[in-house]
């Protein structure tokens, strides 16, 4: 089954404690991205990757890092989480020339 | 400054009637538009899209209309079904690869 998986689905952490949210896709997609969803603001892109070892900033990259060492994986790293990063996070992937994206189920992060 | 806006946070429609969800954008460089549907506790799923060279695209019960002069996009669902109850996001793409999403509209279809 074609899918994008994220782990964990729910995470409660404290300010400053480094965390990683994993994302994996099994569709051999070159393009992957991370979004955060906040009430009234829709989905805002954090980072995206056109291919292995190629990453670029989206609209709201501050406080986040990503890496793309393998085609299927695109982890999101919060080196020092803060309460304003409390949000619902989605990973997505697609083929390069097609703009319809497949989204993961989401990770709800709470930073206290 | 939000370049893609969905001004109605919610919409309630009777089963069998038409649902019309609206989306306005400000950037004339957007060249491709998409609608996504999102159920609770799930990621968004692609619904329908339209290129800026077209003004209408239809897929079953779903039709998207694009009015470039008004910078307005709408999604029509006919007939509406209770299973259509979800949050709908419109998204727009300009040259490059980033999508800009609207804030979403929650559709409730009453039996």
Image: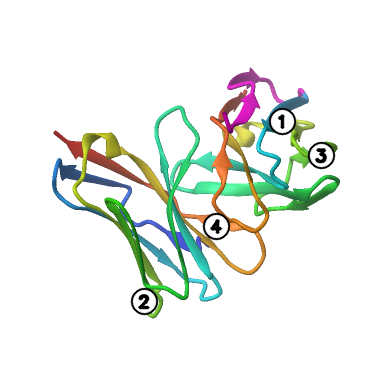
Mark 4–mark 2 CB contact (< 8 Å): no
Locate residue B28, reporting x and y percent.
Answer: 51, 76
Locate residue A72, reporting x and y percent.
Answer: 74, 35
Closer to the camera in the image, A26 or A31: A26
> Which-is-in-front pick, marks 1 and 2?
2
- Callouts 4 and 3 on one subunit: no
Q: For mark 1, does the 10 Å Cα neighbourhood hold few (<14), some (14 to 19), or many (20 or more) residues? A: many
Residue A72 visible (yes or no): yes
| SS for dot 3 | loop
Q: For mark 2, does the 10 Å Cα neighbourhood hold few (<14), some (14 to 19), or many (20 or more) residues? A: few
Residue at mark 1 to residue at mark 3: CA–CA distance: 17 Å
Q: Which mark is residue A81?
A: 1
Q: Residue at x 68, y 21 (%)?
A: A14
Mark 4–mark 1 CB contact (< 8 Å): no
Q: Residue at x 71, y 28 (%)?
A: A22
Mark 1–mark 3 CB contact (< 8 Å): no
Q: Quadrant of residue B70?
A: bottom left
Q: Which mark is residue B70?
A: 2
Q: Residue at x 51, y 65 (%)?
A: B32
Q: Which mark is residue A67?
A: 3
For the magenta stretch, what is the residue range?
Answer: A1-17
On screen, B23 above or below A108?
A: below
> Which-is-in-front pick, marks 1 and 3?
3
| SS for dot 4 | strand
Q: Residue at x 56, y 74 (%)?
A: B29
| SS for dot 1 | loop
> Which-is-in-front pick, marks 4 and 1?
4
Horizontal side of A75 relative to B36 (left or right) equals right
Closer to the camera in the image, A82 or B61: B61
Q: Which mark is residue B100?
A: 4
Residue at mark 1 to residue at mark 2: CA–CA distance: 41 Å
Residue at mark 4 to residue at mark 3: CA–CA distance: 22 Å
């Amino acid at each position: 089954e074609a899918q994008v998986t994220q782990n964990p689905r729910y995470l409660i952490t404290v300010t400053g404690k480094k965390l990683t949210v994993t994302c994996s896709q099994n569709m051999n997609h070159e393009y992957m991205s991370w979004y955060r969803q906040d009430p009234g603001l829709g989905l805002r892109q954090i980072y995206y990757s056109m291919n292995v070892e190629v990453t670029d900033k989206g609209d709201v990259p501050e406080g986040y890092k990503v890496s793309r060492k393998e085609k299927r994986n695109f982890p999101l790293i919060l080196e020092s989480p803060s309460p304003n990063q409390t949000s619902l996070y989605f990973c997505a992937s697609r083929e390069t020339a097609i703009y319809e994206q497949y989204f993961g189920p989401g990770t709800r992060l709470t930073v206290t | 400054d939000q370049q893609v806006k969905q001004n109605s946070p919610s919409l309630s429609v009777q089963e069998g009637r038409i649902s019309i969800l609206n989306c306005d954008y400000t950037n004339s460089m957007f060249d491709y538009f998409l609608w996504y549907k999102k159920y609770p506790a799930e990621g968004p799923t692609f619904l329908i899209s339209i290129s800026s060279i077209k003004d209408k695209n239809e897929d079953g019960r779903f039709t998207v209309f694009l009015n470039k002069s008004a910078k307005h996009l709408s999604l029509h669902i006919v007939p509406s079904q209770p299973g259509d109850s979800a949050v709908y996001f419109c998204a727009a793409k300009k040259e490059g690869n980033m999508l800009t999403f609207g804030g979403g509209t929650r559709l409730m279809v009453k039996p």
